[in-house]
Image (spheres, rainbow, N blue to C red):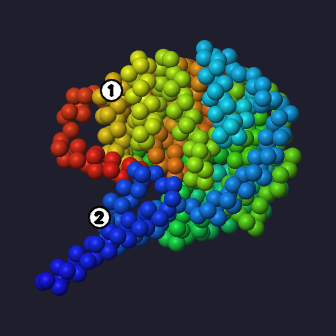
């Protein structure tokens, strides 16, 4: 027994020492993430290292450089082209009650993310999956030159096959069709799912890593973006993926409440650039060269000014998170947030608390059912903390809420792929539209109020009624929030 005991303690000490060495050797890692990974590796000797191998390692410097080099190729062309329409040194700031602050937000994205302000777009808010796919499939069937598609989740169910059929039909007619899918989100697809598309001249490639799930050492860095660009003239982005669950056809999830955008105008060109950069970073043998046919400037299509902002683990700027912080700090009256996961880092949580204590009406809406139970428990813990400071948290009770929106003072709106959580801010590749349009912002507020009528308010009494076991699970889950 003495030998077994000695071996046990030697194993624990060696595991702990290796854990410290392994986690701390990677520079520029967030302190909270360091402690979370140490907890995982020490609590799960041996197995914790396997988890870390697949989920914990940062992107190598070589890979970061490679992605950034691709970005420079695409971004230089975009910025130079759009300078024909916009003098970035003298931006025409959208009319606002806080003119200077709006200018600061625009400059934040321009300087930190090279996100050009595009003016005069026509933007439609879509909040139902059937409406989204009906409209998008109609647009795809009219494509004449190219169709570019990126989705995080792409299922081979009825809507997945319907979309694939529409893409195949256009490829048969000589339209250039390219599909970029995330190897984690599309892991359930059979390896021959896109064979027909390829047979007709289309292309389908995994983003940033092997499509073989079990050997993909970058699977923690997910392309969570959803982008569809049709002929460089129409684009879609937002929360909907491709699957029958997004049409509300999964009984266990119920009605699927999400938010998506259909964009016409020069904002499409920013999403086009984002797709081309992602494609070139993923497909070394099939890279796309800059071509004016991909950037057909269309002039003014509507009244909406917007910026397309992207973020990911390839860049320490965390532009979308900084945009949220700036928006919340700008608010004079109200902040409305919808998100399926509410796991803010310390900076965002403090910004929300400051807003609440300053008299700003802060409302957050969350789903009433988890699609990831571990993450949901951490979400409830942060929600309870927000309530303690006077914020309002609504629990959507009409199915599953997957919408990712934030609107301030019924003036500025953000819709995109980023959840209000650390994973979206630091680990996922995301894209959001920041929209300067009172009409759309007010429409989103009305949608929020409509959803609130199908929700219940999470009160202090409900939180106080949590059992000791439930509170333990919430706090335990919260320990791992920096790496969830």
Image spot of residue 286 (x, y percent):
76, 64
Task: Left or right? Give the position of 179 relative to 476.
Answer: right
Residue 182 visible? The answer is yes
**Distance from label 1 to label 2 (Cα)?**
34 Å
- Residue at 46% over, 46% down: 422
* Residue that carries the numbered disc 2 in the rendered image: 43
Question: Callout 1: helix, strand or loop?
Answer: loop
Among all residues in the image, which is located at the extreme top? 97
Image spot of residue 250 (x, y percent):
44, 48
Residues at discs 1 and 2 in contact (Cβ within 8 Å)? no
- Residue at 29% over, 64% down: 43
Q: Give the vertical position of 349 relative to 62 (above or below).
A: above
Badge 2: how crowded within 10 Å, few (<14), some, or many (20+)? some
- Residue at 82% over, 56% down: 289
* Residue that carries the numbered disc 1 in the rendered image: 389
Image spot of residue 70 (x, y percent):
73, 56
């Amino acid at each position: 027994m003495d030998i077994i005991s000695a071996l046990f303690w030697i194993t624990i000490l060696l595991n702990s020492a290796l854990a410290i060495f392994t986690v701390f050797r990677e520079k520029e890692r967030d302190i909270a993430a360091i402690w979370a990974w140490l907890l995982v590796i020490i609590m799960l000797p041996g197995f914790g290292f396997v988890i870390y191998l697949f989920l914990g390692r940062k992107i190598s410097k070589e890979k970061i450089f490679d992605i950034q080099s691709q970005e420079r190729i695409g971004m230089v062309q975009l910025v130079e082209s759009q300078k024909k329409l916009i003098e970035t040194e003298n931006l025409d700031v959208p009319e606002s009650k806080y003119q200077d602050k709006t200018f600061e937000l625009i400059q934040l994205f321009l300087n930190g993310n090279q996100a050009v302000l595009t003016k005069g777009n026509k933007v439609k808010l879509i909040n139902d999956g059937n409406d989204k796919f009906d409209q998008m499939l109609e647009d795809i069937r009219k494509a004449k030159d190219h169709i570019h598609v990126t989705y995080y989740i792409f299922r081979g169910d009825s809507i997945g096959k319907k979309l694939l059929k529409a893409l195949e039909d256009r490829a048969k007619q000589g339209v250039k069709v390219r599909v970029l899918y995330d190897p984690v989100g599309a892991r359930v697809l059979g390896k021959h799912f896109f064979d027909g598309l390829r047979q007709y001249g289309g292309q389908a490639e995994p983003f940033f890593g092997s499509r073989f799930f079990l050997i993909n050492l970058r699977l923690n860095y997910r392309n969570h973006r959803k982008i569809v660009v049709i002929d460089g003239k129409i684009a879609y982005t937002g929360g909907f993926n491709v699957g029958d669950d997004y049409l509300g056809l999964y009984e266990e999830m119920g009605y699927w409440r999400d938010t998506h955008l259909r964009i016409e105008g020069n904002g499409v060109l920013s999403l086009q650039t984002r797709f081309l950069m992602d494609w070139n970073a993923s497909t070394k043998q099939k890279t796309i060269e800059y071509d004016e046919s991909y950037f057909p400037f269309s002039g003014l299509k509507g009244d909406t000014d917007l910026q397309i902002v992207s973020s990911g683990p390839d860049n320490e700027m965390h532009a979308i998170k900084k945009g949220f912080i700036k928006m919340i700090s700008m608010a004079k009256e109200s902040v409305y947030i919808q998100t399926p996961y509410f796991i803010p880092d310390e900076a965002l949580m403090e910004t929300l608390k400051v807003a609440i204590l300053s008299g700003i009406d802060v409302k957050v809406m969350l789903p009433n059912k988890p699609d990831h139970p571990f993450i949901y428990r951490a979400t409830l813990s942060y929600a309870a903390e927000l309530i303690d400071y006077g914020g309002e948290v609504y629990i959507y009770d009409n199915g599953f809420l997957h919408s990712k929106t934030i609107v301030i003072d019924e003036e500025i709106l953000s819709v995109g792929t980023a959840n209000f959580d650390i994973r979206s801010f630091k680990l996922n590749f995301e894209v959001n539209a920041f929209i300067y349009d009172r009409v759309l912002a007010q429409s989103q507020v009305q949608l929020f109020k409509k959803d609130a009528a199908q929700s219940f308010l999470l009160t202090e009494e409900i939180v106080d009624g949590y059992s000791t076991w439930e509170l333990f699970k919430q706090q335990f889950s919260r320990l791992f929030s920096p790496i969830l």
